[in-house]
């Protein structure tokens, strides 16, 4: 298995997140400034990291309808696919509320949000990717094995700290 890249495409910044090679865990990677050469720069980074698949967050409206942001992202995904010569799949995935989830997580941890840092963009990409990875495993990916309640360490007496 190879790594999967998630893209949170914004008009100013593009947040990126990478999976591990087993495609279990998503981690923030970097933020790119959006501009005329960003597609070529991203395609180069994708090749360098030997990415197997790219998932781009699709900014659907809460109703599920497409808005103007969706048109922009579809065009970006199309250009990225062409830059990768269609050798690496580029897939659009629902990203509704990923930025809101990222901002809430940062605030909960007491982080002062500075949009220029691009941390929210990276975390939004991480949310998109982790949701994608979880859904790719299907319902069995969320379940514990049948003997999950038979964990010996759960029956031990708690250890007390020495004073």
Image: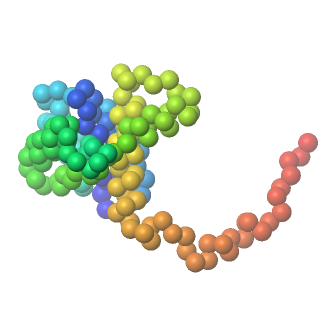
Which residue occupies the extreme bottom position in the image? 146
Is 35 drawn above or below residue 127 in the view shown?
above
Q: Nearer the viewer, residue 98 or 151?
A: 98
Instruction: Let me know if residue 44 appears in the view.
Output: no
Is 97 drawn above or below residue 138 in the view shown?
above
Question: Residue 49: where, in percent of width, then height?
Answer: 27, 46
Question: For this view, does 39 lie left or right of residue 21?
Answer: left
Question: For this view, does 152 lie left or right of residue 83?
Answer: right
Residue occupying the point 61% across, 77% down: 147
Question: Residue 112: where, in percent of width, then height?
Answer: 50, 23
Quarter of the image with the C terminus is top right
Colouring used for the render: rainbow
Quarter of the image with the N terminus is bottom left
Residue occupying the point 20% across, 45% down: 66
Question: Residue 60: where, in percent of width, then height?
Answer: 26, 45
Instruction: Let me know if residue 8 appears in the view.
Output: yes
Q: Nearer the viewer, residue 47 or 28?
A: 28
Residue occupying the point 52% across, 27% down: 111
Q: Nearer the viewer, residue 147 or 60?
A: 60
Residue occupying the point 25% across, 26% down: 12
């Amino acid at each position: 298995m190879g790594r999967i890249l998630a893209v949170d495409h914004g008009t100013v910044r593009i947040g990126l997140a990478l999976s591990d090679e087993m495609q279990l865990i998503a981690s923030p990677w970097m933020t790119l400034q959006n501009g005329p050469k960003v597609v070529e720069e991203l395609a180069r980074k994708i090749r360098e990291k030997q990415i197997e698949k790219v998932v781009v967050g699709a900014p659907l409206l809460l109703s599920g309808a497409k808005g103007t942001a969706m048109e922009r992202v579809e065009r970006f995904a199309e250009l990225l696919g062409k830059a990768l010569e269609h050798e690496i799949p580029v897939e659009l995935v629902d990203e509704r509320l990923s930025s809101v989830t990222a901002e809430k997580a940062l605030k909960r941890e007491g982080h002062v949000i500075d949009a220029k840092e691009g941390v929210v963009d990276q975390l939004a990409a991480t949310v998109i990717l982790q949701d994608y990875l979880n859904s790719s495993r299907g319902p069995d990916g969320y379940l514990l094995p049948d003997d999950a309640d038979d964990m010996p360490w759960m029956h031990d007496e708690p250890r007390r700290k020495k004073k």
